[in-house]
Amino acid sequence: MKFSRLYLTFIFFVLYMPIFYLIYYSFNSGGTMHHFESFTLDWYKEVFADTRLLIIVLHTMIIALLSSSLATIIGVFGAITIYYAKHRWKQTLLTLNNVLIVSPDVIIGASFLILFTIAGIQLGFTSVLLSHIAFSIPIVVLMVLPKLQEMSPTLIDAARDLGANEWNILTKVILPYITPGIFAGFFMALTYSLDDFAVTFFVTGNGFSTLSVEIYSRARQGISLSVNALSTLLFLFTLVLVVVYYVITQRASAKGGQK
Amino acid sequence: MRRYAYAIPYWLWIGLFVVAPIILIIYYSFFDIEGHFSLVNYETFFTPVYLRMTVNSFWYAFLITACSLLIAYPTAYLLTKTKHKQLWLLLIILPTWVNLLLKAYAFLGLFGTYGAVNALFEAIGIGTKQLLFTDFSFVFVSVYIFIPFMILPIFNALEKLNPSLIDAARDLGASEWTTFRRVIFPLTLDGVKAGCQAVFIPSLSLFMLTRLIAGNRVITLGTAVEQHFLVTQNWGMGATIAVFLMIAMASIMALTGNKKWGVRQ
């Protein structure tokens, strides 16, 4: 028992050590990640004074919100398509759906780069947005599909018997039932988009950059504590996102319990 | 009929972003750097340079997967025994929400010549070691990044395990090790497979870690694809390597079996 607690403590220590290491040194006036001189907020000031960085943050947010919203809409209808598909087709559709989830990022990035070049789409905002939508759709589908599958088909039959048309069935029966899945899918898509580096790295042009790509190019130049300050802010943002997600899912499941 | 109208964007997506990219990659792999149709890329791939790179990538991916599994299984097992397991699980998942690049960047500081790890080594008398830009740091950071993806499916599999089976094994006189080997492990094999898939495939194609942490000392197939597409602009060769990565991926999926896809995940 003692050993197991020690083991888990060690795992958690290793998991969180790098993150807190970054945060700790973001307050270092010394400018390095190994010798703490004195407490300062200069690096945070530097982050907030860096207009280019702030624009990149804004771009990242816009891309994330837009791509996950659009991916959620397409993905929900995709899940419904798979749900209604005949058995033989269902497996094929699911396999096609999962291709982008299991593909290594480099391949997704490289193949999208070819695709955009052939289609004549200029690399930049559009190409990044389209790629983010593309790799988020299957995740939404996978989050929504189990909800559809656990829904009793008699619900739809009942609605139809009571005279509902297809549109009514969709908006009054199916969508309300799968709402928790939709939220889960949206949040997963959001985190995938915020977290993506490899695909964006391939399809982003010269003038456009997201946070991951920017951090990569800064990290390649060596250590700069403004990256630490930025990571602290991002970590706090992530925490807020987790709490929001947690509250939403808890509320959704509580609602489901009441009914 | 109207039911099919709303499926149009999804079908478009499958056509444009799933099927077309695969075809394009295969198509491009048959063109040399000047744009002539040829099999030269495949010839190049079967030269010792690329074959060694392939073997290397697989070796590193195997190492990363094996280390992750060895660390993750006990972690998942012990997590199921804790009191607030859902909370602890959330805490395991939380670091995956921190940008990958930032975690890699943190290790630049931790493993640096004057970093925390070397300071610790100095304190216990091992002395300063070159940690950054070695294969050790590459494997360590990769395992660090992938481990939650290994813990999660194993944890889920362990949760689904019927505890009375373990009691039954005990009652029938099985030792703890025998119970684990004959009952627990076989019944959680699906989780282990899912975890191995989730770690092995991405680790075949890591490229930012090889650049940031391994300082180009480790060249994986992923690094080569990135190099050909973005630096040397030899798309044909990059596409050829990508074709082999896709074949590897498909065989791994077939090998580990993906019956459970879509149902859970």
Image (cartoon, coloured by chain):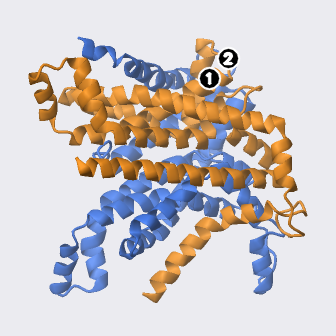
Q: Quadrant of residue A1?
A: bottom left
Q: How far across and how far down the image is residue B34, in percent?
A: 69, 17
Rendered shade, chain A: orange
* Residue name at image x 35 percent, y 47 percent: A252
Vertical comparison of A217 with B172: above or below: above
Query: Can residue A223 be spotted in the picture?
Result: no
Query: Looking at this view, is A101 or B218 the one in front?
Result: A101
**Chain B pictured colour:** blue
Depth check, front residue: A258 or A8:
A258
- Which is more N-terminal, label 1 or label 2? 2
Image coordinates for residue B144, horizontal then vertical, percent: 58, 62
Mark 2 = which residue?
Answer: A122
Q: Residue at coordinates 23% horizontally, 11% vertically from top-left? A: B1
Mark 2 neighbour class, 10 Å CA radius: few under 14, some 14 to 19, many 20 or more: few
Residues A81 and A170: in front is A170
Crowding at dot 1, Cα within 10 Å, few <14 / some 14-19 / many 20+, comes out as many
Chain of residue at mark 1: A
Instruction: Check disc 2 and report its element: helix, strand or loop.
Output: loop
Say which mark, if any, is on residue B55. Answer: none
| Residue drawn at the location 91% of the way across and 64% of the way down | A30
Amino acid at dot 2: Gln
Q: Which mark is residue A127?
A: 1
Residue B239: x percent and y percent? Answer: 58, 29
Tag 2, which chain? A
Q: Tag 1's secondary structure?
A: helix
